[in-house]
Amino acid sequence: MRIVLAWVGAVVVLAGAVVGGVAILNATVFSASAFVQDYLDALRAGRVTEVLDLPGVDPGALDRALLDARAREPMHATVLGSRAHGDVEEVHVAFGSGQATGETTLDVKRIGSRFGLFPRWGFAVSPITVVSIGVTGDARFQVGELPLDVAGGGPVAYAALTPGTYLVHHESRFLSSRDITVLADGRPVNIELEVRPNARFVEAAQAALEAELTACAEQPVLFPTGCPFGQATTDRVVSAPHWTISEMPTAQLVPSDSFGIWAIDRVAGVARLSVDVQSLFDGRTSTHEAEVPFEASYLIGFDGDELALTPTP
């Protein structure tokens, strides 16, 4: 009898230990907070495919380009705590990258169990932040290390995993933008990236403008072809006209009416004409010299690394 009672006692103790162990595991290893921490660890490691396979992660009809791991900045993230709200566990998370930090709440719910003992979790609300990006000045831009482009400047609504930090910018041979840091914390984000000419573009445009006007001045005619200046005379021309640019204009770069094409805005300059003429009245010859003001504007195209200018009315 004593042996039976001893075995019964041992079974009770063992059962209590098992129940207690399950309770501890449910509160730690298999808790909602642990599920979210595993999710955060996968995000930090760039295991995006694994994250997208988690229950409740759904980008919907949004553009999925930002789900590429190359778009994300290195991120630190940690679970601050959780609380139950009905059948939903609200898990509070702090995250950031460098000086950019934020907090968000991820809602998870129990979707089943493992071995009938341990809970399985999924997202009650998809951890997706809608990031709408529009661009001016050029269709191309980068998010992190991911090159993208937006036809016509957008905007395009992208799906971004929450939480996350994203650096939106443009850097190319002739164009640049300021960096915009996006904190994906679940709230919709709308940004417009302004792409502007960099110093190299301004310098190249000025050189192209000077080359264009200098080529005009080299034409030994009163009205150089395709050029913004010229002058008529009532006398007979008896020498080849000689032009020089006495006041070279400064190029001012502006977006044209066609998206992604830049232009030199209307600028003012002065050309100097020197030509020998013979009076039709008395036959005397003289040198005619004149300062000829002009205005010019151009569309900018590219021929390899060189700029090609097309005059506009």
Image: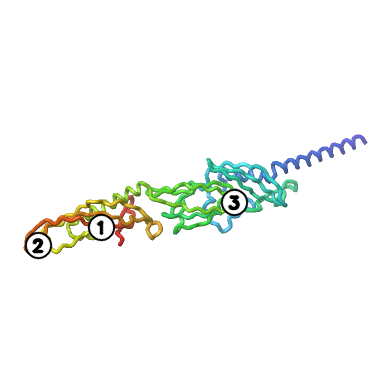
The residue beneath circle 2 is: 279
Kind of residue sitting beneath label 3: Gly
Dot 1 falls on a residue whose secondary structure is strand
Q: Residues within 10 Å of mark 1 (few under 14, many from 20)?
A: some
Q: Residue at x 75, y 42 (%)?
A: 23
Kind of residue sitting beneath label 2: Ser
Kindly identify which numbered label has been placed on residue 294. Answer: 1
Choose mark 3 or mark 1, whichever is in front: 1
Dot 2 falls on a residue whose secondary structure is loop
Dot 3 falls on a residue whose secondary structure is loop
Residue 283's x, y, as percent? 6, 62
| Front residue of 2 and 54 | 54
Outermost right residue:
1
* Mark found first going from the N terminus, 3 or 2: 3
User: In this rendering, does residue 233 appear at all?
Assistant: yes
The residue beneath circle 3 is: 186
Kind of residue sitting beneath label 1: Phe
* Mark found first going from the N terminus, 1 or 2: 2
Q: How far is disc 3 from disc 1 in space, using C-alphas?
A: 56 Å
Residue 20's x, y, as percent? 78, 40
User: In this rendering, does residue 49 appear at all?
Assistant: no
Q: Residues within 10 Å of mark 3 (few under 14, many from 20)?
A: many
> Which quadrant of the rendered structure holds the N terminus?
top right
Q: Quadrant of residue 17?
A: top right
| Front residue of 40 and 167 | 167
Residue 194's x, y, as percent? 44, 52
Name the image colouring. Answer: rainbow
> Which quadrant of the rendered structure holds the C terminus?
bottom left
